[in-house]
Image: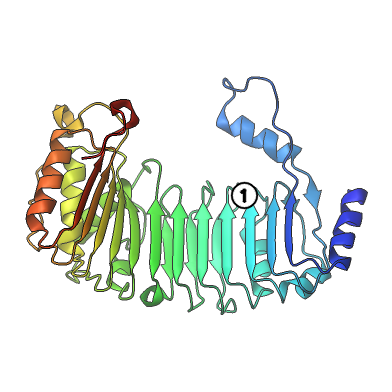
Amino acid sequence: MTDLKRWLDYAASCSVSDLNLDLSPVPPSADTSGVSRRRRSRAASVAAPALDFNCESSSLTRLNLRGFHLTSLPPSFKKLAHSLEILSLCEIYLSYASLRRILSNCPFLRSLTIRRCPDLKKVIVPSSALRLTRLTVVDCRKASEISVSSLGLLSFRFSGALLKNYHIESGAALEDMYISSGGAVPAMPRGDWVKPFGELANLKILTLCSLALEYIAALSSRADSGFRWLPKLVELQLLMLMMAQSNLSDIYSFFKYCPCPRLEKLFIELPVSACDPSMEMYLEVPMEDPPGIGFDNLRILKLNGFKGHRNEVQLAGDLLKKSCILEHLVAVIPMGNAGEKF
């Protein structure tokens, strides 16, 4: 670590503005296919070095850290943090309290990205992060809560197991939101998963996975506050892990409970599975009717991974019937079918 300290001191003496520090251990060459995920994570934690990060460059605006234990924040961090605008933490071992202290010392931070930080249980953004406009949280497996008290957030992107609790103070200011989960969770998340959709008056771009659609449909149908208008939404992307009858109903429910009168672009990522889930009897559920509203401004409809399954064809047909001025319909067949478009 002595050589690393000298290297950081040299970078600081050069008044570096963009610093990328990657201390990720070299992955083992032996086959680890039979090793459990927990054991691999434990081995990675042991192999990752510990570091008191110290780089006294007053001109540092972009900082990318990866692959080590951030043990403490030296006094010099407060000095560099006053100029920091973009911070990315990937595979960094730190507590939510340490993260909050970092953010409290970064008054000019505009963008925060957190990826695969295995010890992080919460992401708490204090109100002092006045200039934070973009927050991205990806695959932090222990994270169960996100709370953003700053009022200027414009973009929120989350990928991982759906949260138990979350709160975004500036929901009405959000312009871009991305929520994706790669798998199911054992129970319905605590808190009102639908409430924020009544506060997204300025949202223009929205991406949702099929699991998020399922929760929105289930909670919207029994909520008391009525419809959740998305009056400024112009682009919607749906990431479908499955396309069973229940998933088709969830899509229809979303448009029923969250009308998007200005929607211009709709992109639907269909599942890669070659089997037709509509043929599976155990997935049969009461079918939600197609949305009663029209898509008066929809100009682009793209179905990626279109295989011609019954539910895919039904969805495409129902959307076409409701679209008054559609200009482009793109159906992309999987690579196994020569990647044809029609």
Instruction: Please say whether residue 221 is visible from this viewpoint.
Output: no
Drawn side of residue 297 relative to residue 65, left or right: left
Query: Which amino acid is tagged 1?
Result: Asp
Drawn side of residue 61 relative to residue 268, left or right: right
Q: Where does the image place residue 147, in percent across and percent down from the top left?
A: 49, 67
| Residue at horizontal 32 percent and vertical 63 percent from the top | 192
Please, what secondary structure does the residue beneath circle 1 have? loop
| Residue at horizontal 9 percent and vertical 50 percent from the top | 318
Residue 172 lies in what quarter of the image? bottom left
The residue identified by callout 1 is: 119
Residue 35 lies in what quarter of the image? top right
Drawn side of residue 254 relative to residue 156, left or right: left
> Looking at the image, what colour scheme do you see?
rainbow
Q: Where does the image place residue 266, in percent across and percent down from the top left?
A: 25, 56
| Residue at horizontal 34 percent and vertical 30 percent from the top | 335
Instruction: Please say whether residue 242 is visible from this viewpoint.
Output: yes
Give the answer, above or below, for where 253 lies relative to 153.
Answer: above
Q: Where does the image place residue 92, in percent across and percent down from the top left?
A: 67, 51
| Residue at horizontal 49 percent and vertical 70 percent from the top | 148
